[in-house]
Amino acid sequence: MFGLARAQEKRQIKAEAARAERAFDAARMQPLQIQQDIARRALQECVVTMARLSSVKSSREQESLYLLRLTELEQQMRAAKLQTRAREMEPPLITTVFTHTLLAVSSGLRQGEGLESIGAKIAQWSRSILPDFDRFERRFAH
């Protein structure tokens, strides 16, 4: 039974990484100003979530809150997909995917080479297009 759950988890992580990769490609097709807006919004969401989590002392509670936030983001993604064409990724959906990916990777709850790789790509891309990236990086680290 454990092996089946582990295989299912690996498939889910692989699907999340593929979704994030599609969002990354879609984001880079946008004009620079929209790319910057996507990156800022995703990073701001991560900063807000991390600030909320830092106020919780219990690691068990933190993990539960991370999972709850990831689930909320997954629901937002499903709802957004229903409202848009199947193959299109609009900026709000891209932002949600990026937020989900960055939080999943930073939490350590979802580990997988593909997911960690695309998380690093998103962070590097954000750093390269945002002149104020350091502001987010400092707040995200605290």
Image: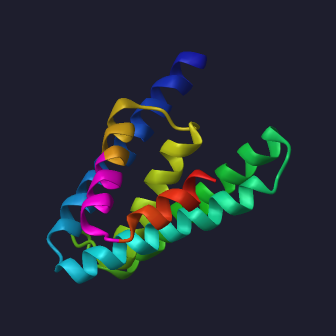
Image x and y of residue 44, in percent: 52, 70
Name the residue at 32% across, 59% down.
127
Q: Position of residue 98 (x, y in %)?
A: 40, 60
The structure residue drawn at horizontal position 40% and vertical position 62%, both measured from the top left corner, is 97
Chief SS of the magenta region: helix
Quarter of the figure with residue 77: bottom left
Q: Is residue 114 magenta?
A: no
x, y (%) of residue 2?
Answer: 60, 18
Q: Residue at x 38, y 81 (%)?
A: 83
- Residue placed most toward the observer, 123 or 131: 131
The answer to whether residue 78 is visible is: no
Q: Quadrant of residue 84?
A: bottom left
125 falls in the magenta region = yes
Q: In the shown orientation, is residue 57 left or right of residue 129? A: right
Q: Position of residue 116 (x, y in %)?
A: 39, 38
> Which stretch is magenta?
121-131
Question: Is residue 131 visible from the viewing direction of this image?
Answer: yes
Image position of 91 with respect to 121: above or below: below
The image quadrant where one finds the N terminus is: top right
| Residue sitting at x 56%, y 57% | 140
